[in-house]
Each structure stands twice: as C-alpha cells, then as structure tokens.
Image (cartoon, rainbow, N blue to C red):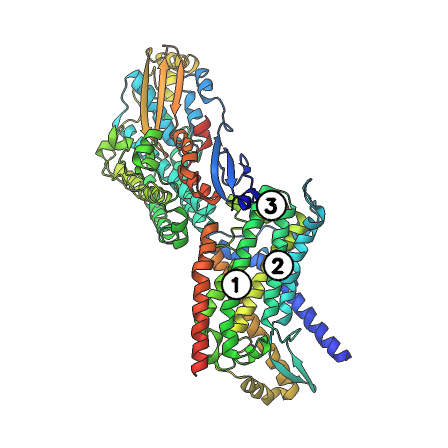
Amino acid sequence: MSEISKDLHTEHMVINMGPSHPVTHGTVKFLATLEGETIIDLDVEIGYLHRGFEKMCENSTWQQVIPYTDRLNYVSPLINNTGYALAVEKLLGIDVPERCKYLRVIACELSRLSDHLTNVAAAGLELGAFTAFLYFVEARELVWDLIEALCGARVTVNYIRIGGLKNDLPERFEEKVKYTFKEVRRLWKDVDKLLTKNRIFIDRVRGVGAISAEEAIAYGFTGPCLRACGVPYDVRKAQPYLVYDRMDFEVPIGETGDNYDKYLVRMEEIQQSMRIVEQALAQMPDGPINVRMPQVRMEPKEKIYSRIDSLIYHFKTVIEGIKPPPGEVYLAVEGGNGELGFYLVSDGSGKPYKCRVRPPCFALTAAMPRLVKGRLLADIVPTFDMINMIGGECDR
Amino acid sequence: MLADLIESLAKIVFIFTVNVGVFAPILGWVERKQSAVMQDRIGANRADILGFTAIGLFHSLADAVKLLTKEDFVPANANKFFHTLAPFIALVPAISAFAIIPFGGRYELFGREINLVIADLDVGILYVFALAGLATYGTVLAGWSSRSNWSLLGGLRASAQMLSYEVAMGLSIIGIIIVYGSLRLTDIGAAQENFFRWGIFLQPVGFIIYMTCAIAENKRIPFDIPEAESELVAGYFTEYSGMKFVMFWMAEFLEMVTISAIVTTLFFGAWHIPFVTDAMLLSWFSGFAGPNGAAALAMAVNIAVFFAKVSFFIWLQMTIRWTLPRFRYDQVMRMCWKMLLPLSLINLSITGLVVLLL
C-alpha cells in the first residue's frame, strides 16, 4: 500500500484565475492551488483597479470629491454620494431640509435596487442561467431610466451636493416610479420562478460559502452577507440617518450565511427598497431642497448673476472650496454591500486633509479563502459573486 | 449497381445538405433568435447585404466568413498534431452518426424499392454509441493537447462526464431494443406505425433517461461543465480559434440534430403521423397522383414529418439550454452514477420482466 501511494505521485496545480477571467469581474486575481478540482489554497490579489481615490480627494475641494465617489461602488453611486455628503455635513454641523432628506432616501434606495438587481443577475449569469440575468438587467435598465430622469446620468450620477441636491424631482416622477416598480416586480417574479426553487440553482448555492455569525463579524462582514448569517445589522436601522427611522421596512436575515441565504436576502431587500421609495414619495413634504447657506451650497444662478454677495460666495466656494471647521468625523451609511463609512479629517482649509473610505467589500473579499478552501473550483463562482466585490470600491 | 450508387449518393447529399448546409447555420440563427425571444431581446439583426437583413439570417454567413478568415492560432507549447486533429475527431462522428438514421420508410418508386436511410446497418443503434465514444476523444485530445490549465481541466471533466453518461445512455436504450426486438433503426421506426406503440408510451422512463444523458453527452447547459465559461474560460476549446473552433461548435449543433433524430426514431414514431398508417397515406395520394406519384408524395410527407419532429426536439433542447443554470462537476457525476444508472437498470429489469411474462 505504501509503495502504491509513493508511485501515485501527484502534483498540485497552481492556477491563475484573473485578473482577466470571466468570474473575476471587478478585476481581482485568485491564485488557486488545486488538487484535482479541490481548492486547497486560495490567494486573493486585489488592487487592479486602484486609482488613488484618497490621494485624489486630498487635492480637490470638498465639493469636487463627489464625482470621485461615483466611481467607488459604480453599481450604487448615489449611496456613495449620499454617504460622503452626510459626512461633510456632519463635519460642518448642518442639517439639510426635510424634502432633501426624502429625496436622498429615494435616490439611495433606487441605487440599492440597481445594486441588488445587478448582483443577483450576475449570479444567474455565472451559473449559466443567462435568461435570469437578462431579466434582471432589464429591470435594472428601468431603474436606471428612473435615475436618469432624476439626475440626468445613469451611472456616474454626481447628484448629491453638500448641503442639498443638484435638482428637485423631475415632472411626473411618481408615475414613472409606479410604472417601473410594476415592471420590476413582474421581472422579480420571473426570476424568482427561474431560480429560487430551481433544484440545480439550489444545489449550486446552498451550503456553499457558509460562514458562522461570529466568524463573519470577526472578518468585519456587513450588509447582506452579514444579514445572511442571521445578524440583523443594518445601518439604516442601527443608526438611522436621513429619514429611515420614519420608514416602515423589514431587515431580512438568513440562517446559515451560505450563498443561498445571501441570494434570498438580496431578493427580499429588492422588495423592501421598493417599499421604501413608495413610502418616501408619499410622505415627502414640499419645500426647499438646499440649505440656505451660501458659504456651503451655491445659490441659484439668477442670484449669483444679480447680487454681489452671492457672487462673492460663489467665487469663494468654487475657488477655495467650502471650509469645514478643523476636526474629524466618521459616518457610515448602508451601502449596497454593507456599511460604507467615510472618515474625514479637516484642517480648516478648502480641501480634505484626509478622506478615508471604509469599503464593505474589502472585508468580504478578505474572507474569500476561508469561504472556498476545501471546496471545488466551481464553488468560487457563486461564492465570489455573492460577495459582490466591486473593484472600484475595494481598491479605490 | 449504378442505380444503387446514385440512390446512396443522393441520400448522402440530401442528409449532408440538410445537416451541414441547413441545420447547422440555421440552428445558430434559431439559437440566437429563440434566446432573444425568451429574454425580451431582439436578437441578431445587424448583418445585412445591400440593406437587407433577412431577420438576421445573414449572421450565419457573416460568422462563416469571419471565422474562415481568422487567424488559426496554436499555442506555443501545444502539441500541434493533436491540437489540429482534435476538432476533426469531434466533428466527424457528429456528421457520420446520421448515416444510420432513417428519415423515411420504404417506398416503391418506378419499380425500385427505396429505403430512406443511408446505411441500414444491422447493428444500428450500437453504431451511434460507437461514434459517441469516438467523439469523446476529440474533446479529451483538445483539452490535453492545448497545454493550458483551463483546457486540461475541461478535458478531464469531459472525459469523466462523457464516459459516465455513455453507460447510462446505453442502458436506457436497451429497453427499447427489447421491446421492438431489433437493433436496426429502420425496424424500430417501422414498428411504430401504430400510435400506441410509440416508444414514448412503451418506454417513458427510457425516454427521460436517454434525453438527459444525450444532453449531457453533448455538453450543453445544464451539463456544460467541460466548457463552463465562468469557471474554465471556455474549457477544452479555450485555445482554439477560427475554423477549428467552428468545428467544435458545429459538432455540438450537429450532435443536437442527431440526438433529436434518434429520439424521434426511437421514441416518437420516426416518420409516422399519429393514427395514419403508411398504407392509408398511399391510398389517399394514389387517388389523384398514380402509384409512383403517391409513393413520391408519401415520401415527401414522411420526410417532412420526420424533420418536423426533429425540429421540435431541437427546440426543446434549446429551451432547456436557455432556462436552466449549470450543474457542478461532482453533482453531474453523482446524478449519473447514483440516479440515472440505477434508474435505467431498474427500467431495464422491469422491461425485461414484462416482455418475458407477456
């Protein structure tokens, strides 16, 4: 017996998955050591999408950072906008008008919708269910139409301003929302039929990528991946910002933290996000959308062209930037993937002294080896997809 | 002698035209259009000749031109001989399997008996299995000779999967052979003249097992783990380009036609129309077309019916392809050895027992 095992000498296969590989979207590289098809070691290499976000921010005014935040999690840019703007407002110690808060909630939830739709769609695509992918991409397209109506762009939105918004709701927005949500719910049902009770899909995702709640917390999981483990932590409920405390919505949780639970949590959050948008639209008061502080938020162009004080403020905020008092602040919002935190330091000048982002998917990506070690090569696919690593956010 | 030769040649040309000339390119188009319909898309409609798009039909032509003029890339470390040989080994069985499939019955035409099958082999269905076994080599060689990790993994998966499913596939057919008492496909086809003697009624379990195994053998979703594009890039044909790639692609489509043809022949009454016997068909037509004309018309009708059924099963396979996600490697193997194989054995024993007792 011992001689036979000596003769049957096998070598491990070291295989490079990515950075250019169908499953490593978001640009990441896995260095997998395989024994047959079993993964015995996995090394995650990130940084392929590093653009020096934090350094760029230090060289721009506070307001100029907002377009950069679009490119963090480019699937849900409005949440990044909001998170950053809220953090700067906290630093400034100002509060935005009621209507602005509601509009930001709507923007955030539309973004979350598009994030979860994309994620579930990609999960389908990578497991070979191309039809489910296109159904949800169609739904996302409709949501993007809404976002386009709201702020004029589909992906790089640049909608939220410090102390307000770029513009108010467009005309007949409620009707568009009503139509879009009807379609999204229809497509949701289709995908639900195609995947949720599909034996092949369940076999591929159930029990794969499972992690206990303690371990998930130790890794720093947040968002849908943590909630799939059964921890009902949602920044919107735990530390309500904007007007989330007035919204009636549920935080879906899973049990085992495997890929199936992550999928179910995301599917349910799609429904909850739509509920929130509908409530926000119904409750939204009339009123201004910007703070009336010309040293923070630009005044309307007519005023700038006609009044000298407005013109001076305009000049000062554009050239020097708004000047928050020296200090530091950390503020987290619930991003598409979890807690999206902004840690800002101001030295009293017009530019951030430090702008650090806590990306939710960095912690999730770090757990990849733990989630797939000892499993088959094919299990990387659903596990990595459900982690939903977004290169722009993880690498910054 | 000469007449025999001409008859055989005519049949070969017919089948070859239908398969390679019509089915393979049309299927590429159908696959695109059907998936588009299922997914709320428009599908291929851009290729045009002088402004005419012909609902996207020119795409097959454009593909052919594009792929013929593409660089034929062989990786630096690949075994050039086997790398070139593999697509041929994959394609040839797919084309030649059709030789034994009857696409019509026997007809008296101008004093000649015409049997609408290229080669009426007495080993019949076994020949198909032999060819399916050969096709495995094409895939495995492609995976091995490319000298790429992805290809190698794809080739390994393919060899395990295709060999395993061949066992269950073979066993699932034996029930049919017992019931009809012949290996010859023309006999099996002729035996299904009575609608209630169709294979699907006599061997329903056999049909399901055969269909599953055949799709697995053809490596299409949900069993496309040897190519699994999200895991293995493109699996065993990752390193293929141009015409060699098309040969794998065509082999897949042709195999789909072959599977449909075999399913039609074995389980769905071959060229027969339900409740219409060959004699009835002949007597209807001979009323106005004379004996020769009646035979020719009956022949045309039977061929049309046969290919209509084949098209239906092609459609079915495509619908499955665009509906289901992909299995995992170990699940595919478990399904074969722990579910399909015992099931086909049970099916076989019960069939044997029933035939023995009756």
- Checking the image for residue B238, the label placed there is 3
Image mark 3: chain: B
Badge 1 is on which residue?
Answer: B167
Q: Which chain hosts label 2?
A: B
For disc 1, the chain is B
Residue furthest right in the image:
B2
Q: In this view, does B296 lie above or below B33?
A: below
Residue B237's mark?
none
Mark 3: few/some/many CA within 10 Å (<14, 14-19, 20+): many
Cα–Cα span, label 2 and label 1: 15 Å
| A32 horizontally vs A348: left or right | right
Give the vertical position of A129 relative to A352 (above or below): below
Q: Nearer the viewer, residue B136 or A61?
A: B136
Q: Is residue B75 left or right of residue A289?
A: right
Q: How crowded is mark 1: few (under 14 residues within 10 Å), some or many (20 or more)?
A: some
Residue occupied by mark 2: B135
Nearest-to-viewer mark from 2 and 1: 1
Residue A75 visible? The answer is no
Contact between marks 3 and 2 (CB within 8 A): the answer is: no
Mark 1 or 3, which is nearer the eye? 1
**How far is the residue under mark 1 from the one under mark 3?**
28 Å
